[in-house]
Amino acid sequence: MTEDRDDPSLESAAPAGLLGTLDQERSTAYVIDREGRIVFVNPAWDEFATANGGQLHPSILGTSLWRVVPPILLPFWQAGIGKALSSGEPWEHDYECSSDLVARKFRMRVLPMAGRAFAIVTNDLIVEEPKADSQEVSGARYLTSDGIVTQCAHCRRVLRQDAGLEWDWVPSFVRSPPARVSHGLCPPCLEFFYPADGA
């Protein structure tokens, strides 16, 4: 995708042939600069975006990654990516990104380039299996008094307002999220995937 690599500093920072290799990757891959701007995406990005209603490469280039990460996950991502850029060492993190019908787990790898002005981010699929059937439920029990649904930014379950800290898998909310969604982290995801010392 040569149109994605106009920035000569990206060209000079990338080892010869690297961007062409990323173009051939089946996993989504993108490059961010030190400020977190997306400066390159591979064709797999567009395939994933098309299948999941995301932004295609012409409109995403130049966008800050920090604008598209849910606010509750932002400190974790910034710390992990910042650690990779400052240390020059790779950083990895496993995360869930399931649809209403398919459970998926990915491994994100952040690989700083020489000079640490850019980092390659790859997202490799490590698990994909059909989601267990779950009963569709009425959305009313998930609305706050302000009409907001709280959805886990990691596993996408939603907080049940009538039962304390119960979080349910509601396929219709994954298929078509409500208009007013606030992202949080359910307790299991917070403890397992985002421990306080995790970055």
Image (spheres, rainbow, N blue to C red):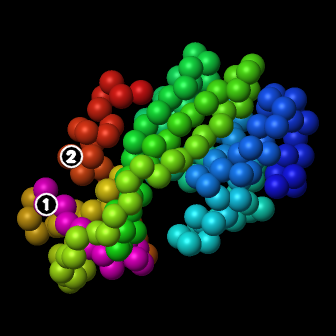
- Label 2's element? helix
Q: Percent position (x, y) of residue 162?
A: 11, 69
Q: Is residue 167 magenta?
A: yes
Amino acid on which the number 1 mark rests in the picture: Glu
Q: Percent position (x, y) of residue 174?
A: 37, 71
Q: Nearer the viewer, mark 2 or mark 1?
A: 2
- Label 1's element? loop
Q: Percent position (x, y) of residue 103?
A: 34, 63
Q: Which residue is mark 1?
A: 166
Does any portion of residue 12 appear in the rendered image? yes
Q: Is residue 46 magenta?
A: no
Q: Residue at x 75, y 19 (%)?
A: 115
Callout 1: 10 Å neighbours few (<14), some, many (20+)? few
For the record, the magenta segment spans 165-178
Reading the chain from its start, which is encountered first: label 2 or label 1? 1
Camera-side residue of 36 and 53: 53
Q: Which residue is mark 2?
A: 188
Task: State the quadrant of the C terminus.
Answer: top left
Q: Which mark is residue 97?
A: none
